[in-house]
Amino acid sequence: MFYDPRQDLRPAPLTHNPLNALVAPRPIGWIGSLSAGGIHNLAPFSYFNAVSADPPTVIFAPNSRTDGAAKDTLANVRETGEFTVNIVSLTLAQAMNETSREVAPDADEFALAGLTPVPSELIGPARVGECRAALECTVFDIVALPARPGARASHLVIGNVVGIHIDDALIIGGRVNTKALAPLARLGYFDYGTVAEPFEIPRPD
């Protein structure tokens, strides 16, 4: 089939937006932020990725809440210009999902999910103590994305990585062991996956 998503995101026979399943797997950015009033926030975003190694740069795209207001994460990074990216390992899948709830702005998702906020080295927002890797980031830019009439607003947050935390046990032979990290990835719909059998393909000479 062929369709124009600007007209309809889910034309028959589709019942869900297929982009989530077609562009997959996607890493999950578990974004830690801090309000101007000092309230911790933690939320997962599957529209997330690294876009540059040098300078180290990441992006994530928060849409608005169901009531049309800006999500707490977007409001916080606008106010403070900082956030953490916590790498979600398979063992943290349920805790990550718990932090996807829409809750009041004064709610602390770290506490709600039973997670440990650990102070960052260079920025204000905390990282998740249970995560085996995390990035400390400062906001480079926030771009408003075009929205269809009546659709929720979305923004692209571009962050510079200014600090990187890695569990020493993951570093083997000078490299991070991705299989041991077991990063969780979002597939389509409510499906998730992880790295099971990585393989190497050397670049051609």
Image: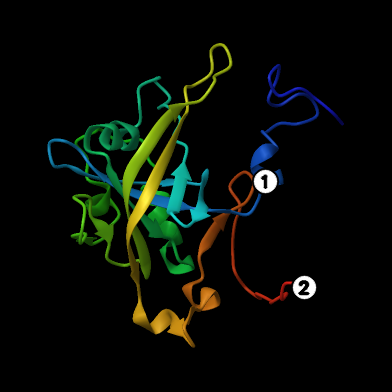
Residue denoted by label 1:
23
Q: Quadrant of the N terminus?
A: top right
Decide if residue 127 is on the left or right side of residue 177. Answer: left
Q: Quadrant of residue 169?
A: bottom left
Residue 107 in sight in this render: yes
Numbered marks: total: 2
Give the answer, above or below, for where 75 lies relative to 69.
below
Residue 173: x and y in percent read: 49, 88
Q: Amino acid at mark 2?
A: Pro
Q: Identify the residue at horizontal 39%, vertical 32% (top origin).
A: 142
Give the answer, above or below, for where 185 lies relative to 90.
above
Between the C-alphas of marks 1 and 2, the distance is 26 Å
Q: Amino acid at mark 1?
A: Val
Residue 100 in sight in this render: no
SS category of the residue bearing label 1: loop
Q: Residues within 10 Å of mark 2 (few under 14, many from 20)?
A: few
Give the answer, above or below, for where 185 lies relative to 45.
below
Outermost residue toward the front in this view: 205
Q: Quadrant of the C terminus?
A: bottom right
Q: Quadrant of residue 3?
A: top right
Foreground: disc 1 or disc 2 = 2
Decide if residue 27 is on the left or right side of residue 137. Answer: right
Q: Quadrant of residue 146?
A: top right
Residue denoted by label 2:
204
Residue 178: x and y in percent read: 53, 73
Q: Identify the colour scheme used.
A: rainbow
- Dot 1 or dot 2, earlier in sequence: 1
SS category of the residue bearing label 2: loop
Outermost residue toward the right in this view: 1
Residue 75: x and y in percent read: 29, 31
Residue 9: x and y in percent read: 68, 25
